[in-house]
Image: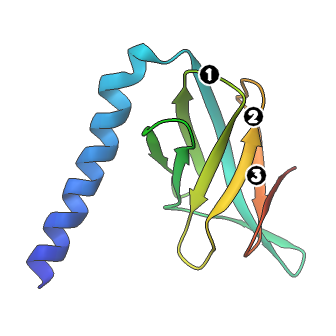
Amino acid sequence: MKRVFLILFFFNIIHVLWSQENHDHELENEIRGKIVATENGKTEPIPGAKIKWKSDTHMAVSGLDGSFEIHVGKLPDTLFIKAVGYQLLAFEVKEVRTDLVLICNQDKCWEE
């Protein structure tokens, strides 16, 4: 059972990396930012969150510090964010951003 889980995990990672590297030339806009959680007035990064655009299949995964980088062809578009312990979150991006900080709680995200 552990082998099956590990194999599926590595295929998922390979898919994410391949999707980002092999299709970037088709995309014009890069969005960079950070995802953080807020609870009791304290903010902490959300590592390992899956980030995907509504309009295409490109995905990214947030780093240990909550940072992410994802490309998109057309804006505006909606980012979907899925992290362990959170509902599926959505945030509309209207323009190219390289400093986007999304603050999330259990059911919504907003910009800092």
Residue located beneath label 3 in the image:
102
Q: CA distance from mark 2 to mark 1?
A: 18 Å
Name the kind of residue labelled 1 in the image: Lys
Residue at 63% x, 31% y: name it.
31
Image coordinates of residue 74 in percent, x first then y, are 62, 22
Q: Quadrant of residue 54?
A: top right
- In the image, which is nearer the foreground, mark 2 or mark 3? 3
Q: In this rendering, is residue 110 above or below 55?
A: below
Residue located beneath label 1 in the image:
74
Question: Mark 1 falls on what kind of element?
Answer: loop
Q: CA distance from mark 2 to mark 3?
A: 10 Å
Q: Which mark is residue 99?
A: 2
Q: CA distance from mark 1 to mark 3?
A: 20 Å
Residue at 35% x, 23% y: name it.
23
Q: Quadrant of residue 55?
A: top right
Q: In this view of the protein, can residue 98 be seen by the observer?
A: yes
